[in-house]
Image: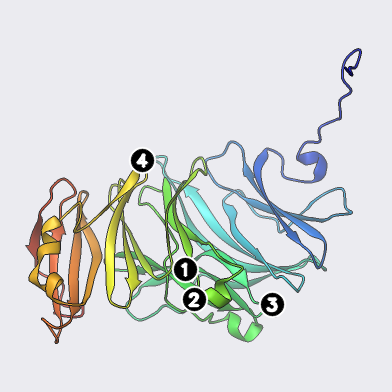
């Protein structure tokens, strides 16, 4: 039996500041860029109400990290992406504030580029430079998912604001100087949106970046607690979705566009596991509608939350029973199995 007499030898443990990372930070997220042999670290404060995330970079033969940009405590680097072939890094910044009631909220501020070889950064796009689709008031950039090998296109997620609530979409952003003034948006799958009280984020990650070009995108839907960073994976989906939080932030309704012929609504809670589908657990009377039973294209969609516990839902579609289409709207109580018929807004298709 082998043993060692006396105290065991110890190695000095380097602190974050010893290696150039921000003082008082932790929870590092690391990424490696093979062409430049660079390590990128994203860190956030251990004890702060504001996210204040920071990016730092070093090459594998360098002893210390160098900060990427100099920002005030209100600015946080919320997301970043690396180019697989070129010395390019892009990241999103957001500005956070704490209100008098203690609620912390943030707005996106800019999309920036960083050259890993020259260590130079530049603003690519900022507020007011995203083209908002018809019917929406504003847009904000949230997460970056991937970049084309030529560095010309970034794939990410964007939030859209309309009068009835917020939805999110898949975005492609041109990174050339000519395209920077008006990044191109393609509305598609929703991926991330904060709760009204700022405590949670409901969103998703691209689950298959390696096969997305050949098999199409798949997304893992999650709920994240902003204070702790803890995430819970809810489900995986591969088409579009529409995310709407209840006004009290106790529930989030997700409309999944499952195929070209159907969609369904699932309600989740950030404080408890499980999911409940409208038409199966809530509003079970909707599944028995003649229009639902008699048509082969039927869509359930959440429109908005007029009350904390009752989303407004639209059921619409077409088929053999209604070749010219139908649309009905209901207020679905989360505390009852039945629903209440209401008038559909005139601006939606089918009315």
Gap between marks 4 and 1 measured at Cα: 25 Å
**Among the two numbered marks 3 and 2 on one chain, the one whose residue lies closer to the N terminus:** 2
Classify mark 4: residues with Cα within 10 Å, few (<14), some (14-19) or many (20+).
Answer: few
- Name which quarter of the figure residue 317 lies in: bottom left
**Residue that appears at 87% across and 48% down:** 63
Q: Nearer the viewer, residue 304 or 36?
A: 36
Q: Position of residue 323 (x, y in %)?
A: 14, 86
Q: Secondary structure beneath disc 3?
A: loop
Q: Nearer the viewer, residue 106 or 283?
A: 283
Q: Secondary structure beneath disc 1?
A: strand
Q: Are marks 4 and 1 in contact (CB under 8 Å)?
A: no
What residue does disc 3 label?
A: 149
Classify mark 3: residues with Cα within 10 Å, few (<14), some (14-19) or many (20+).
Answer: few
What residue does disc 1 label?
A: 158
**Residue that appears at 16% across and 45% down:** 335
Residue 250 sits above or below residue 121 on the image: above
What residue does disc 4 label?
A: 271
**Among the two numbered marks 3 and 4 on one chain, the one whose residue lies closer to the N terminus:** 3
User: In this image, 88 relative to 303: left or right?
Assistant: right
């Amino acid at each position: 039996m082998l043993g060692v007499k006396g105290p065991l030898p110890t190695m000095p443990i380097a602190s974050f500041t010893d290696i150039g990372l921000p003082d008082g930070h932790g929870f590092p997220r690391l990424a490696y860029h093979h062409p430049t042999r660079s390590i990128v670290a994203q860190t956030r404060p251990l004890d702060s109400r504001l996210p204040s995330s920071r990016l730092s970079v070093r090459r594998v033969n360098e002893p210390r990290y160098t900060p990427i940009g100099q920002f005030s405590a209100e600015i946080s680097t919320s997301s970043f992406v690396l180019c697989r072939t070129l010395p390019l890094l892009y990241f999103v910044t957001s500005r956070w504030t704490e209100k008098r009631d203690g609620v912390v909220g943030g707005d996106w501020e800019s999309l920036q580029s960083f050259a890993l070889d020259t260590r130079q950064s530049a603003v690519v796009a900022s507020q007011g430079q995203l083209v908002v689709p018809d019917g929406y008031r504003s847009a904000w950039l949230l997460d970056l998912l991937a970049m084309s090998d030529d560095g010309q296109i970034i794939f990410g997620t964007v939030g859209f604001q309309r009068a009835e609530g917020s939805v999110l979409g898949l975005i492609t952003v041109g990174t050339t100087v000519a395209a920077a003034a008006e990044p191109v948006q393609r509305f598609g799958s929703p991926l991330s949106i904060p709760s009204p009280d700022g405590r949670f984020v409901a969103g998703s990650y691209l689950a298959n970046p390696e096969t997305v070009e050949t098999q199409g995108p798949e997304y893992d839907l999650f709920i994240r607690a902003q204070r702790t960073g803890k995430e819970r994976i809810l489900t995986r989906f591969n088409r579009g979705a529409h995310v709407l939080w209840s006004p009290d932030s106790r529930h989030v309704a997700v409309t999944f566009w499952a195929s070209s012929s159907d969609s369904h609504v699932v309600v989740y809670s950030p404080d408890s596991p499980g999911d409940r589908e409208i038409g199966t657990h809530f509003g079970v009377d909707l599944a028995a509608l003649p229009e639902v039973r008699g048509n082969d294209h039927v869509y359930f969609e959440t429109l908005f939350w007029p009350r904390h516990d009752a989303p407004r839902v639209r059921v619409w579609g077409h088929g053999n029973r209604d070749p010219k289409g139908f649309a009905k709207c209901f207020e679905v109580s989360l505390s009852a199995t039945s629903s209440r018929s209401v008038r559909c807004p005139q601006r939606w298709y089918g009315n």
